Every structure is written in C-alpha cells, then in structure tokens.
Image (tube, rainbow, N blue to C red):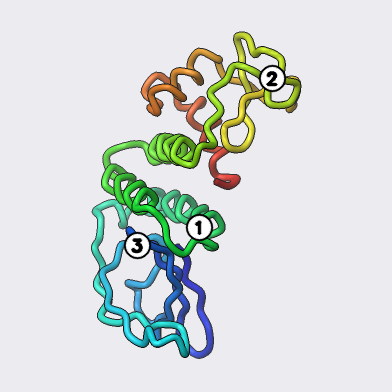
Amino acid sequence: MSVRKVKNEDSIAMVLTARDVRVYYRFFGARHSILQLGNLIDFEVEGEDGRFLPRLRSLSHIGFPWLFDKNRLLVWHNFIRLFEPHLKEAEEIDSFYYDLLLSAAKKWEKQNPKRIICESYIRLLEYEGRLSPEKHCYICEQPIAEEIALMQAFKPAHPSCIYSSALPTKKVLDFFQTKKTLNMEDHEVDYLFNIVIKGL
C-alpha cells in the first residue's frame, strides 16, 4: 500500500495481506523494482522477534498485463494510495480488502478502471456499514426529488445544499442497489470517481 525510502537505498513498505496490514523493512529496497506501490508480491519474512521491524526477503512479483499501460497504472496507483490512510491503524482485518483489490486488479485490463473503482468503493461502503441509500438530504434532511448530489462516502444531498452538480436520482439509487455502473454514462462515472478519489 505504500513504499517509503529510508537511509541509503533501504525501504519501509506497508503491505496488505488477506489477514492484516503490516510494516516491513527491506534492505536495498530502492534497487528492487518489485517493491513498488500497488504490486502484488509473494515474500518471506525474517526477524519477527520484535526488536526491529521484520524484514522482507525473497520477493517475487505476480504481474498483470495492464502494468505496462501507463494510464491504467497511474489510476491504479491513485486508487491504492487511498487505502493507506484508511487502513494504517488496523492490525488484523478481514480478507475483504485484499479480495476487493485482487478482484479489481483482475478486471483492470478489460474494463474501465474508473468504473471498477466506483463499484469497488460502493462495496467497501456497504461492507463498512457506511452506505446511505436514503432519499433524504444529509444536510437538510428533506426528501430528494429528481436530481441528487453526492458528498464524500456517497452521502446524498440536494445539489443546492452542497453547491454541487447533480446526477439523476433514479440512476444513483439503482447504482446503490446493484453496485454496478452499467446504466451510467461516462460523465456520470467521472462524477462518482471524483468523489472516491478524495478519500475513502
């Protein structure tokens, strides 16, 4: 989820596994292109005796074909960066987050990455109990009619309450129900994507 260079060419990496989020030390990590933000890696750990950060060794990269597409890779990096602040305090986690990212990575080459991100995010909100599928404005608590604006975490609001552009309410509620962007136009997906990219 993150890689930070430290003294000389060493690195400190925050790694998401199916069970936890851990921080590891990697000697000469800056020399190894495998240890990069968003890469799926297999590795061994040594030095888990508690005196210092455990160390990564024997890294191998499990690649995806889209890694050579700079635009897709950039969007992937931006998506992965959202998870560090969201999960950095967690020690043990359910496999949901790992499975969510692995599922997204497998679809990344064939589908529009922005759509994958929006669909992944709404599943994350539902999993964490933060999805607000009501037809009432989060700000004024009045019913929302034909058009809906969304705040962070896809909280519904009147466009006039948050001074925002809007989407058709029916399409948004359908998206909340199905967790799919299939019935949305690209500019509507861009609207959703711009909310997600501000933070989980």
Q: Residues within 10 Å of mark 2 (few under 14, many from 20)?
A: many
Compare residues 95 and 5 and report the one nearer the observer.
95
| Label annotation for residue 71 | none
Compare residues 29 and 50 and report the one nearer the observer.
50
User: Nearer the observer, disc 3 or disc 2?
Assistant: 3
Disc 1 + disc 2, Cβ < 8 Å: no
Task: Name the spot of residue 142 as percent of width and height, x first.
Answer: 71, 15
**Snapshot quadrant of residue 175:** top left
**Going by the image, does 169 lie left or right of 71?**
right
Residue under the point 51% across and 25% down: 188
Q: Amino acid at mark 1?
A: Leu
Q: Residues within 10 Å of mark 3 (few under 14, many from 20)?
A: some
Q: Amino acid at mark 2?
A: His
Marks 3 and 2, the one that precedes in the sequence? 3
Which quarter of the rendering shows the N terminus? Answer: bottom left
Residue sitting at the far top: 146
Marks 1 and 2, the one that precedes in the sequence? 1
Q: Residues within 10 Å of mark 1 (few under 14, many from 20)?
A: some
Question: Dot 3 corresponds to which residue?
Answer: 17
Q: Amino acid at mark 3?
A: Thr
**Snapshot quadrant of residue 168:** top right
How far apart are labels 1 and 2 at the CA level? Answer: 31 Å
Residue under the point 46% across and 39% down: 121
- Asked which secondary structure carries label 1, the reply is helix
Question: Dot 1 corresponds to which residue?
Answer: 87
- Asked which secondary structure carries label 2, the reply is loop
Task: Name the spot of residue 53 as percent of width and height, x first.
Answer: 45, 83
| Label annotation for residue 158 | 2
Disc 3 + disc 2, Cβ < 8 Å: no
Residue under the point 58% across and 47% down: 199
**Going by the image, does 69 lie left or right of 88?**
left
